[in-house]
Image (cartoon, rainbow, N blue to C red):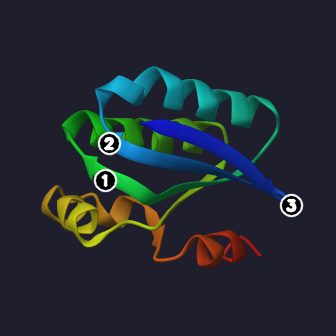
Amino acid sequence: MKIHTQNYNDVTVIELQGEIDGDIADVLKDTVVETVSLGRKRIVIDMSNASAIDSQGLELLVWGREYCRRSRTQLKLAGLDETIEKILEITGLQTEFDRHTELAEAVRSFA
């Protein structure tokens, strides 16, 4: 798993590449915490290059959602494939996240 961040004006995009699982937990948590501590209040997690997600990956997304809520930071997901969308649906998490098909759409949605 690789994590890259990039800023688009006042939106920070955290791009995930590879499997979203427990192996990336510390790195992703540190990235979210650091982003929020820098005063960035709009975050998109770009999952368009994510190949899979497991239960620990789902827990990680829920943690991110809760951390951002407590920090008064908006969090959106972008680029989820059909499988990840289905997993969110099966687990009842589809309504818990603001999801967008395309990264550009997610970034623009903050306007």
Q: Which mark is residue 17?
A: none
Crowdedness near tag 2: few (<14), some (14–19) or many (≥20) residues, C-alpha within 10 Å:
some
Residue 76 appears left or right of 91 = right
Residue lying at the far top in this picture: please name it: 26
Crowdedness near tag 1: few (<14), some (14–19) or many (≥20) residues, C-alpha within 10 Å:
some
Q: Dividing the image into 4 quarters, which one contains the N terminus?
A: top left
Please tell me whether mark 3 sits on a helix, a strand or a loop: loop
Q: Dividing the image into 4 quarters, which one contains the C terminus?
A: bottom right
Residue under pointer 2: 19
Residue at (41%, 26%) from the top-left corner?
Answer: 25
As drawn, 57 above or below 88: above
Inter-mark Cα distance, 3 to 2: 28 Å
Residue under pointer 3: 9
Inter-mark Cα distance, 1 to 2: 5 Å
Sequence-wise, which precedes: disc 3 or disc 2? 3
From the image, state whether disc 1 or disc 3 is nearer to you: 1
Residue lying at the far right in this picture: please name it: 9
Residue at (32%, 42%) from the top-left corner?
Answer: 19
Q: Quadrant of residue 47?
A: bottom left
Q: Amino acid at mark 1?
A: Ser
Q: Amino acid at mark 2?
A: Glu
Q: Are marks 1 and 2 in contact (CB under 8 Å)?
A: yes
Q: Position of residue 61 (x, y in %)?
A: 40, 43
Q: Are marks 3 and 2 in contact (CB under 8 Å)?
A: no
From the image, state whether disc 3 or disc 2 is nearer to you: 2
Q: Are marks 1 and 3 in contact (CB under 8 Å)?
A: no
Residue at (81%, 33%) from the top-left corner?
Answer: 38
Q: Position of residue 68 (x, y in %)?
A: 58, 42
Q: Which mark is residue 51?
A: 1
Residue at (51%, 32%) from the top-left corner?
Answer: 28
Residue lying at the far left in this picture: please name it: 90
Q: Position of residue 51 (x, y in %)?
A: 31, 53
